[in-house]
Each structure stands twice: as structure tokens, then as C-alpha cells.
Amino acid sequence: MKLLFLYYDIMNLYGETGNMRVLERHLRDQGLSVTVECKTIGDELDFSQYDFIYAGSGTERSQKAVLHHLLPYRESLANALEAGVPALFTGNACELLGDSITDGRGTRHEALGILPFHTTEQPDVRYTGDAVASCELVSAPIVGFVNKCSVLEGIQTPLFQLQMGCGNTPNSTEEGFQFHNTLGTHLIGPLLVKNPALMEWMVTTIGSRQEGFSYQVKHYEYEEKAYLTTYSALRERLPEKPGK
């Protein structure tokens, strides 16, 4: 299996490289042969050759540099995602897939246009805090952290429903998006490492691209304990439901 780590050097804030490191290990534990290719600005891209695509969070400045490099390859990326190639875009990398990004100075940047949403950066506001969410892909609650200055408007297929945290727009409980097997979210942590159930879904989705693959249940004690500890602490802070 061939995995692509996009902009490993400049889109790697908040320990997001952990998503790729741990995902690679989990895939190998399933008996899969895995190769990880790291690509950055200046490299040629051909998305048709990969079984998984990942990009993490970066500064607003790094994001714009990445966008400039990606624009000539948007058709290749769009074709891969449309065909169901599994992908994960975390932090402000997820904003690249929309129609446009308006920065804090009011300048509009054309984005990849794979999904019909628009991002607006807030010049004087930053949204930070823990998050707890539900997701139709898995039964276990999702945990993470958000640190962003942007508002995403026009998303039609949200990924998460929040019980705690900042959504795509202020006061919204919808966060991130799903497009076929592509997941986009501002939840960081790293997301896959913090959520074993979502990691299992991703491993199964990637592995199913290889003929004859059958997921083997594995237990990762430290990852599972870390998740339970985090969720237990955050659950105590969830708002009371009406009637309780």
C-alpha cells in the first residue's frame, strides 16, 4: 500500500505527524506492506498512485503556500477523492478543498474547488478548546482539540456533531466534512491517535483496497487507556441535557 504524506515539513503543527506514524504501524500490524511517500512544495504530484492521502495543520502563511503549489494538481486530487481514495485533512488543511479562502486582510484566495464551501479567516478572533463529538462512521464518541481562526460556510455533509467545542461556524454543532472516503476536520490531537475507533475505521477503509483483506482486531493498550482517560475527563464538562 502506498501512502502520501503531503507537506510533511510545513503542515505539521500540534503533533499531527503522529497521525501518519501511528497509522503506518497499524497497517503493518494488519500484515500489509506499506510505503510512505513524503511530498512538499516543489515536488511533482500524481494522486492516482496512492491508497491514502494525508495533510495536517499549518500556519495561515504555510497554508497559502501549499495552496499555490496544489492548484495545478487539483484535477488529479479531485479525481482520486471522487474515486473513493481514503484521505484525511486535519486543521486548516481541510480548508484547501473548498472554493475559496478569504484571509484576515480580506484577500480572497481561490482554493481547490472540490467541495462547495467558503472559508473566512477572522483577523481578531481565535477559536480554541476541547471537543467531544459523535460520528456516524463509529459508535464511540470522538475527542479532540480545536485551534483555528476560520469560519467554514456552505458545508453540506458535516463529519461530526458536537457536544462540546467549536463547529464550522460560530454556535454550530456541525464540524468538519465527509466526501466519499475523505475526512476533513479542524479537530487535532492527533485525531487518529486520540480516537482508536476512528483509527480502526481508517485502517479498514485503506486495507479494503487490497484484495483479500480482512481486518484483524488488535488491542493497543496505551492508545485505548489514553482515549478513555481523555473522554472521561471531558464528559464531566459536557453541558447538562434538558430535563436532567
Image (cartoon, helix red, strand yellow):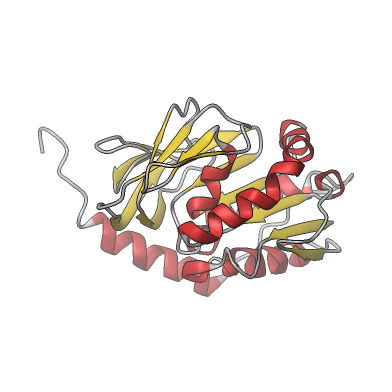
Vertical comparison of 175 with 231: above or below: above
Q: Is residue 201 visible?
A: no
**Residue occupying image coordinates x 70% and y 69%:** 25
User: x, y (%) of residue 182?
Assistant: 63, 40
Question: Can the viewer see residue 38 in this picture?
Answer: yes
Task: Look at 17% across and 46% down and name the residue there.
Answer: 239
Quadrant in which the N terminus appears: bottom right
Quadrant housing residue 232? bottom left
Which residue is the extreme one toward the right?
211
Q: Nearer the viewer, residue 55 or 193?
A: 55
Going by the picture, which residue comes out furthest to the bottom? 222
Asked if residue 229 is positioned above or below residue 115 in the image, the reply reads below
Residue 80 is left or right of residue 90, and the answer is: right
Q: Position of residue 67 (x, y in %)?
A: 61, 49
| 205, 102: nearer the viewer | 102
User: Which residue is more in the foreground, 200 or 148?
Assistant: 148
Question: Image quarter for residue 237?
Answer: bottom left
**In the foreground, 7 or 35:** 7
The quadrant in which the C terminus is found is: top left
x and y percent of residue 117 in the render? 49, 30
Residue 229 pos. (x, y %) = 35, 68
Is 142 on the left or on the right of 170, as rendered?
right
